[in-house]
Amino acid sequence: MAGGAMTDSAKRAAQQAEDRLEQVAENARQRFDRLTEGRLADSIKNGRFADQVDHGIDQARREAGRRGQGGSER
């Protein structure tokens, strides 16, 4: 019987540790969301990152034009 009691005790300890880790992870997610919500979400909504895509398209067009005229890509 002693072996069975140890197993139950170990299972309870493991479950408690898992529950604590899940709570720590949830707290970290909530803190991250609070810290970044105002900055990251607003930046995205305001189009801060939208312009970066346009630069890549413009560069590709310039390189294609140069290749078409017999020049190097850059």
Image: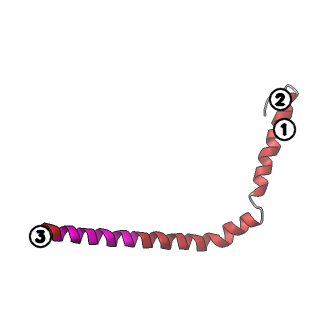
- Of the numbered discs 3 and 2, the one sitting upstream in the chain is 3
How packed is label 1: few (under 14 Cα within 10 Å), some, or many (20 or more)?
A: some
Q: Give the residue type at disc 2.
A: Arg
**In this figure, which residue is indicated by the disc labeled 2?**
67
Residue that label 1 marks: 62
Q: Residues within 10 Å of mark 2 (few under 14, many from 20)?
A: few
| Number of callouts | 3
Q: Residue at x 49, y 74 (%)?
A: 27
| Gap in angstroms between the C-alphas marked 2 and 1 | 9 Å
Q: Give the residue at x 67% y 66%.
A: 40
- In the rendering, at what x and y percent does residue 10 appear? 24, 68
Extreme-left residue of the structure: 1
* Structural distance between the alpha carbons of marks 1 and 3: 77 Å
Query: Residue 9: x and y, percent?
Result: 22, 72
**Where does the image place residue 31, in percent across and percent down from the top left?**
54, 73
Q: Quadrant of residue 32?
A: bottom right
| Image mark for residue 2 | 3
The Cα–Cα distance between marks 3 and 2, rounded to whole angstroms, is 80 Å
Q: Check the image and name the residue furthest to the top.
A: 70
Assign a secondary structure to mark 1: helix
Give the residues in magenta.
Answer: 5-21
Mark toward the viewer: 1 or 3:
3
Nearest the viewer among 27 and 55 is: 27
Earlier-in-chain disc, 1 versus 3: 3
Name the quarter where the N terminus is drawn.
Answer: bottom left
